[in-house]
Image (cartoon, grey):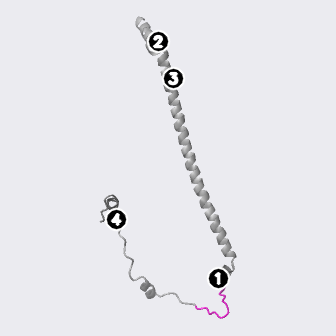
Amino acid sequence: MNRLRRFAFKLKHEYFTFDNILIFVAVILCLFWTYGSISSMSRNWKLASDFETRKKELALLNLEVETLELENDYYRSDEYKELSARKNQNKKLPGENLVYLPENSASAKSKTYETPPAEIKEPSNFSQWMSLLFGIKS
């Protein structure tokens, strides 16, 4: 019993002093403040990245709308109507002659692709770094 009383006295007078309790409360408040700051910064970062993503999507959609409007203008033009009539209905202007050519033969196709293009050897990652850092060409 005596030990228990000594322990309670020691707790009360050494550990649960006003200064120690004040420091403990201050540490707890600092932890809550730090947690709140970090969570609000991460939320702001997420919202900013979402905003940038949506801005890019909007720019892309605006570009697609402009492209489709230009395409519609082209399809309404007389030039497209004339080209479509020539292609689909074999129409021609006065004084023009239509010439139908046969498909290319195998020998004609092989002549156009006689020499394959030379393969470009891409340098390795290490040699690219050496070239960047030290100017060494390999």
Q: Which residue is mark 3?
A: 25
Residue 123: numbered disc: 4
Q: Which residue is mark 1?
A: 83
The magenta segment: 88-99
Q: For the view shown, which residue lies furthest in the top direction?
A: 2
Q: Amino acid at mark 1?
A: Leu
Q: Is residue 19 above or below residue 91?
A: above
Image side of residue 57 versus residue 7, left or right: right
Image side of residue 116 versus residue 102, left or right: left
Disc 4, disc 2: CB below 8 Å?
Answer: no
Q: In front here: 99 or 137?
A: 137
| Label 4 to label 2: alpha-carbon separation | 74 Å
| Label 1 to label 2: alpha-carbon separation | 98 Å
Q: Earlier in the sequence, mark 3 or mark 4?
A: 3
Disc 4, disc 1: CB below 8 Å?
Answer: no
Residue drawn at point x = 50 percent, y = 24 percent: 26
Q: Secondary structure at mark 1?
A: helix
Q: Which residue is mark 2?
A: 12
